[in-house]
Amino acid sequence: MDAESEFQTAEQLQASLAGIKDSPREKGVVEMIVCRPAVNERRNLAACELSVEAGLLGDNWQARGDEDEHGKPANREMQLNLMNVRVIAAIEPDATRWPLAGDQFYVDLDLSDENLPPGTQLAIGQAVIEVTAEPHLGCAKFKQRYGRDAVMFVNSDEGKALNLRGINAKVVTPGLVKVSDTVAKI
């Protein structure tokens, strides 16, 4: 059995698109919160605190710095990562492996450019975040963890328009966020 056979196929992923496109457009739910305290370390949280300066408290976003420009401070435009829970469920049926994607929030909400253009603010729990223009695409780690077809799916033209890999955001108003809280366009 080759490594690729353990992953979802392009056909399976394409078949999931209708359900993904049915995601709520105005108001959804926070399904999972993941903190990344260190590189390749993940911790599922029932609740978290968001800070304007530090993002998700306890996460290593700030300590990692700007991954695109080594040695530079962390890019605030990439402070938080959100992924549609329907997308990750299509890519990886085993929810215990979802945190490997590296996102902090898995939400049931339409994250497409059309629905959430950069500058859109979202109330998430008691906090407010703002969608940024920084692209969030599948990378080599994503391919290793979920397969070639998954990367091609999220990085396709349609995948980019729908933000299947997710979106970047920054904290505008600090506050508490819990699993099962509402995430809604303001």
Image (tube, helix red, strand yellow):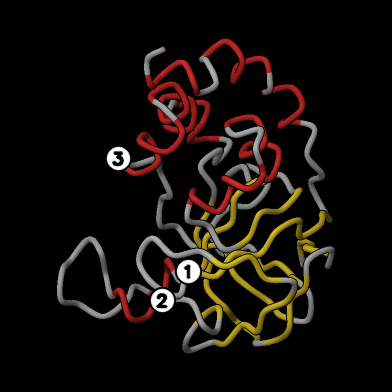
Residue assigned mark 3: 140
Residue assigned mark 2: 60
Disc 3, SS: helix
Per the model, the C-alpha gap separating discs 1 and 2 is: 6 Å
Q: Is residue 155 left or right of residue 185?
A: left
Which of the pair 121/60 is nearer the observer? 60
Q: Is residue 122 left or right of residue 51?
A: right
* Cβ–Cβ under 8 Å for marks 1 and 2: yes
Q: Position of residue 144 (x, y in %)?
A: 35, 36
User: Which image quarter: residue 64?
Assistant: bottom left
Mark 2 residue type: Asn
Residue assigned mark 1: 36
Sequence-wise first label, 3 or 2: 2
Circle 3 crowding by C-alpha within 10 Å: few under 14, some 14–19, many from 20: few
* Cβ–Cβ under 8 Å for marks 3 and 1: no
Per the model, the C-alpha gap separating discs 3 and 2 is: 20 Å
User: Which image quarter: residue 119?
Assistant: bottom right
Q: Is residue 108 left or right of residue 112?
A: right
How many numbered marks, from 0 up?
Answer: 3
Mark 1 residue type: Arg
Q: Position of residue 165 (x, y in %)?
A: 51, 42
Which of the pair 172/8 is nearer the observer? 8
Residue at image location 63% in from the left, 60% down from the top:
105
Q: 166 above or below 122?
A: above
Which of the pair 57/18 is nearer the observer? 57
Circle 2 crowding by C-alpha within 10 Å: few under 14, some 14–19, many from 20: some
Mark 3 residue type: Ala
Disc 2, SS: loop
Q: Position of residue 48 (x, y in %)?
A: 67, 79
Residue at image location 51% in from the left, 14% down from the top:
10
Residue at image location 61% in from the left, 82% down from the top:
50
Disc 1, SS: loop
